[in-house]
Image: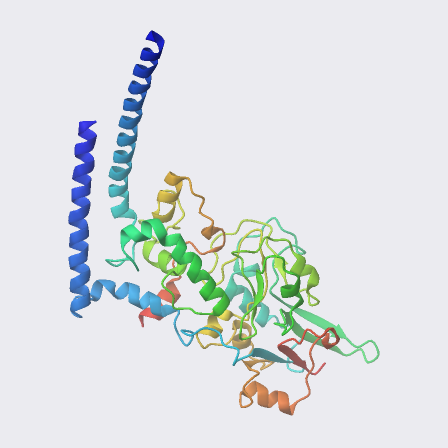
Amino acid sequence: MSKDENRSEQQAHEAQVVDAARRRFLGQAAGATAIIAPGVTLMTIAQADSGAAAEGASSAKRWGMLVDTNKCETGCNDCVDACQQENGWGAGSSDEGLSDSRQKAQWIRTVTVRDKETKHTTQLPMMCQHCEEPPCVNVCPTGASMKRADGIVLVDKHICIGCRYCMMACPYKARSFIHESLHDQKSHAPRGKGTVESCTMCVHRVDRGDQPACVERCDKGAMMFGDLNDPNSQISRKLARVSSTQIRADLGTKPSIRYSGI
Amino acid sequence: MVLSKKLKQRVGILAVVFTALMGFGSAALSDNHGGKHERAIGANAGDACVKETSWMRRNHMELLKHDRDRTLRQGIRPVEGSIKGCVDCHANKNDQGAFIPVDAEGEFCSGCHTYTAVSLDCFECHATKPDVSRVKRAGK
């Protein structure tokens, strides 16, 4: 017993010494810029995510896309590849080995539509339409399915219980459920077993001022990304000039993704 | 009376043994930890965490929990409690120079979580190794 007491006293003393040393160090570091170097690692990493998003998403913006289906070449899969590599699903990941093709994650896919009368086929990319009135958000029992102020629809996987109501509610079949344990996820795209996921409009890139990976990759110029609320943005000016449509506009979901040429 | 006296004695002995064991356990933990801690604190760690180490030991989960909502729901990226920040600093490298996942056995996160038997759910979804390109981008 007395040994133990001695030991704990000694430990307490040591802790005090360490605390004092740490306080001295912190004081010095705060006082002089010359020895701030050890903290640099922390500072730079903190800035890695900053960009223009220090004040967060704002309803002054509404991010959207315009897909020109006339420029989307049948057989081209570049946008899907880019998404997989950026967000680490499908071919961008070695996981989901047990799931079959109907179960595997699918954030974006190419769809071919054919006019029965003219036999004309058109390919277009199909993903989360980032609706202004998202049915997935309406049905979610936990509030995990949510829409940011700037119109990007996301799943908060911290509180997603994997019930998949949102998958049922989505008219665009845009969401997937993860059936297996995953490894080596991308640090900007957390994803895991038991939760639902979908296109995030590359929110991590948008927040730092970049374009979504699919838009950046498409060298045919079939995809355009921008702020629908800004009348002077490239996308708004093009939308004012060319005819475009929202898929299943009759449902009143008001998607942010618009298509021209269909 | 005799019985109860014996019982009291036994309880007393048990208490002493138990306390000694507890003391030994915590000493073993701190020794073990002291050694491991030096090794496992992380390849990129600076000299100080975002808050005092003693505060972080007890409250890191609160920091992460509040800031995850700010980041995900409000899009506020530069936050104190960034799990990417934890991983960037606290991941170690193996002999070949490759990063070891922070949730691997004996590593920074799992070391304590295993000992305290608190399940570590973060890494069901989150990356367990630093994103080298992201850290590079920040450094330029």
Residue A70 appears left or right of A235: right
Residue lying at the far top in this picture: please name it. B2
> Which quadrant of the figure has residue A221?
bottom right
Q: Looking at the picture, does residue B128 appear above or below residue B11?
A: below
Q: Identify the residue at image location x=29%, y=18%.
A: B13
Horizontal and vertical percent position of residue A126: 65, 70
The quadrant in which the N terminus of chain A is found is: top left
> Which quadrant of the figure has residue A219?
bottom right
> Which quadrant of the figure has residue A72?
bottom right
Horizontal and vertical percent position of residue A20: 16, 53
Q: Identify the residue at image location x=45%, y=65%.
A: B70
Horizontal and vertical percent position of residue A86: 50, 66
Residue lying at the far right in this picture: please name it. A117
Q: Identify the residue at image location x=28%, y=27%.
A: B19
Residue A233 appears left or right of A208: right
Q: Is residue A25 visible?
A: yes
Instruction: Compare residues A5 and A178 and report the one nearer the observer.
Output: A5
The quadrant in which the C terminus of chain A is found is: bottom right
Instruction: Compare residues B139 and A123 and report the one nearer the observer.
Output: B139
Q: Identify the residue at image location x=56%, y=65%.
A: A154
Residue A240 appears left or right of A262: left
Q: Is residue B129 visible?
A: no
Applied colour scheme: rainbow
Horizontal and vertical percent position of residue A155: 56, 62
Count the labels in the image.
Answer: 0
